[in-house]
Image (cartoon, helix red, strand yellow):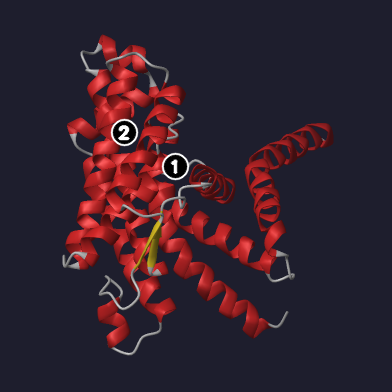
Amino acid sequence: MTISSLGIILQSATSQGVVWALLAIGVFLTYRILDIADLTAKGSFPLGGGIAAVAITNGFSPWTATLFGFGGGILAGLVSGILHTKLKIPALLAGIITMTGLYSVTSRVMNAPNIALLGEETVFSPLEKMGLSNINATIIVGALFSLFVIFLLFLFFRTELGLAIRSTGDNIEMSEANGINTDNMKMIGYMISNGCISLSGALIAQNNSFADLNSGVGTIVIGLASIIIAEVIFRNKSLLFRLFTVVLGAIVYRFILAIVFEFDVEPADSKIASAIVLVLCLSLGQFRGKLHSKKKINGGVAK
């Protein structure tokens, strides 16, 4: 593998990473901020892509279609939030229920297993018409979307409402004791999280030139792998910096996958190759912790 080929792989991984990063940010919000394992992502991701594809093929502008996809994710998050907070269904089960129901909802919305967007106007089209390649257009648009979302989240989590959501995730008992309606905070967190995930689905559907009903497979683990990679590389950082590192984690994860697939992996073996990469990524934190412990022990012995 030459340096030039590595450069091409890195460029491709970056283009994919910046659009998948919105999914990782969405997972980060529930997994790290709210301390909830939400599986709604598997349903809200294809929902966002499906809504955007249907809207585009029906004459809506790609920007409006992308906004519709984002809105679909917000509604999906609201359903999971209601199931968990009002009906007192455990978070994991609430996500599974919503995810299962969303498969039928997305199927109804799309009215087909997949929708082709070849020849349709997308959010990437203006830059491609200016002469940029699809990869470069994806990097620019994906980076702008990611930066915009991070900026809005940073401002939001500095407000009273945002701080209440963070407090709910940090210590729910103390938050309730201070008069915070933790159920409402969870619902808002669910909605923002799945809105980001659906936004990622809408962008990826346009980037791939098709929306697929089964595109949500593996979304949770992709998001978690991106988060873990980011936390292994950068630890104990501020919220703003952590959001940026999640984007970097998504790029690194796509780069690792691209390297693996360079070794002539058979199509039938692609899933197990992805699974092995995920196991390695999710194990990085434990390996780093053990290494850090050994260094402390050795340092103590040396003294």
The residue nearer to you, when weighing 122 against 247, is: 122
In the displayed structure, 209 sits above or below 36; it is below
153 left or right, relative to 272: left
Could you classify mark 1 by the number of other residues whose Cα lies within 10 Å: few (under 14), some (14-19), or many (20 or more)? many
Secondary structure at badge 2 equals helix
Q: Which mark's residue is nearer the viewer, 2 or 1? A: 1
Secondary structure at badge 1 equals helix
The residue nearer to you, when weighing 77 against 297, is: 77
In the displayed structure, 19 sits above or below 301; it is below
**Residue found at x 32% / y 57%:** 202
- Disc 2 marks a residue whose amino acid type is Tyr
In the displayed structure, 190 sits above or below 153; it is above
Q: Picture coordinates of residue 235 (x, y %)?
A: 53, 44
Residue pointed to by mark 2: 190
**Residue found at x 53% / y 47%:** 218
Q: Picture coordinates of residue 99 (x, y %)?
A: 41, 35
Q: Whole-Å distance between the Cαs marked 2 and 1?
A: 14 Å
Kindly tell me whether residue 105 is visible in this rendering: yes
92 left or right, relative to 229: left
- Disc 1 marks a residue whose amino acid type is Lys
Identify the image quadrant of residue 144: bottom left
- Mark earlier in primary sequence (2, 1): 1
Quadrant assignment for the C terminus: top right
Give the residue furthest to the bottom: 131
Residue pointed to by mark 1: 42
Q: Which mark is residue 77?
A: none
Identify the image quadrant of residue 7: bottom right
